[in-house]
Structures are given as C-alpha cells and as structure tokens.
Image (cartoon, grey):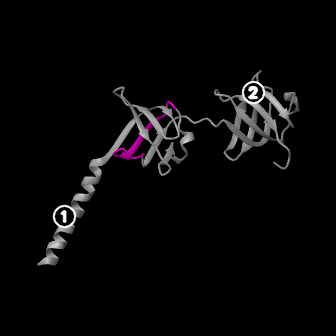
Amino acid sequence: MRTALVVGVSIAWLAAAPQALAADRVVERGIVQSVTPSAVVLRALDGVEIEVPVGARTRIRVNGVPATLADVRPGFVAEAVHFGTRPAVRLRAYGRVIATTLRGRLVGVRDAWLVLRGGSGRQRVPLTAQTVVRRAGRTVAPLSLRVGMRVEVVRADDGSAQVVRILRRGR
C-alpha cells in the first residue's frame, strides 16, 4: 500500500514537473538595441525594450552557427530563452555579418580590388582612395601588392579594404 502511494506521488510529480518548468520559461524576441558583457537589450514589436541577462553558460548562435556574444550586433533580430530572472540559456540572432579582418593569399590584384584566398574561400575586396598598404609597419604604394603575397585586410564598414598589411612568409 505504501509503495503504491509513493509510486503514485512520484508519477504525479513527474507529470507536473515539466509543466511547472515550462511556466517559468520566458522567450523574448526583438531587434538587438545594445550588447554588453552581461546583457542584451531587445526592442520587441510593441516597442518595449527588454534587458535579457546573459552568462557564461548562455549558448549563442548567429545565423545558425555557434558564436560568441561579440558576434551579436545591434540591428540583428534575436530570440532569447531564459527562466525567471536567470541568465538566458539560449540566444539566437540573425543578421548580416561582415568579417572585419580577412587573412589569406592574394590570387588577384587590380586597381579597384583584390581577390584573397583564405579560410573562407575566395573573397573580392574593393580598394578605395583611402586604402592604406603597409609592409613591416611602413606605408608602401598599393603597386607593391603582388599575386602570391600573404596579406591581412582590415575592412571598413562598407566592406572595402581600409588597411592591407603585407605579412612575412612565416606568418
């Protein structure tokens, strides 16, 4: 009799536990307004801004790929799942990601652009009048860029090359 009572109470508790946990679960969706090391501020569709705490255990994905909090940018669409006031367990964000630094080997050099082959494949990077080319810390003429050189390109917000650093062979 006592065993049946314990089993019955255990089954009832197990059936009620997921519902109780689900009641505490909060899903926030909106546009990322700001990102700090401890929180992400989202603006919901109704205009209300929500601060969602994040922590070391928060799983972050940007465009479906595992990422860090530094990869989440204002303007991204995001969804955060948290329980009560605890840090989010999951943060998913979607938006246009522009790599700010590229590294690779030059496979094409023209007056208006470079083609770089690196870890993310081939990428064409526009050059502007403001593009600076450096070798060993000194500014050199863009004409010194040659196919086969290893370079690091720091890109501007518009995707064009801001600085092109010619790397030594061993780097």
Q: Residue 162, percent across and down?
A: 73, 28
Residue at horizontal 41 percent and vertical 42 percent from the top? 80
Q: Secondary structure at mark 1?
A: helix
Q: Point out which mark residue 12 bears.
A: 1
Residue at horizontal 41 percent and vertical 35 percent from the top? 51
Q: Residue 103, percent across and down?
A: 73, 42
Q: Return the residue found at the far top.
A: 129
Q: Point out which mark residue 82 bears.
A: none
Name the one closer to the observer, 162 or 83: 83
Q: Is residue 83 magenta?
A: yes
Name the one closer to the observer, 167 or 150: 167
| Residue 85 quadrant | top left
Amino acid type, mark 1: Ala
Q: Which residues are magenta?
A: 74-87
In this view, the mark in front (1 or 2):
1
Q: Residue 63, percent across and down?
A: 51, 42
Give the vertical position of 39 relative to 10 (above or below). above
Q: Secondary structure at mark 2?
A: loop
Mark 2 highlights which residue? 127
Amino acid type, mark 2: Leu
Name the one closer to the observer, 50 or 124: 50
Residue at horizontal 11 percent and vertical 78 percent from the top? 1
Task: Please rate how many residues cluster around mark 1, counting C-alpha atoms within 10 Å: few if below 14, some from 14 to 19, many from 20.
Answer: few
Q: Is residue 67 magenta?
A: no
Q: In the rendered view, does 76 fall on the left or right side of 101?
A: left
Residue at horizontal 53 percent and vertical 42 percent from the top? 69
Question: Disc 1 or 2, which lies upstream in sequence?
Answer: 1
Q: Residue 156, percent across and down?
A: 68, 28
As measured in the structure, the alpha-carbon distance from the residue carrying label 1 to the one carrying label 2 is 68 Å
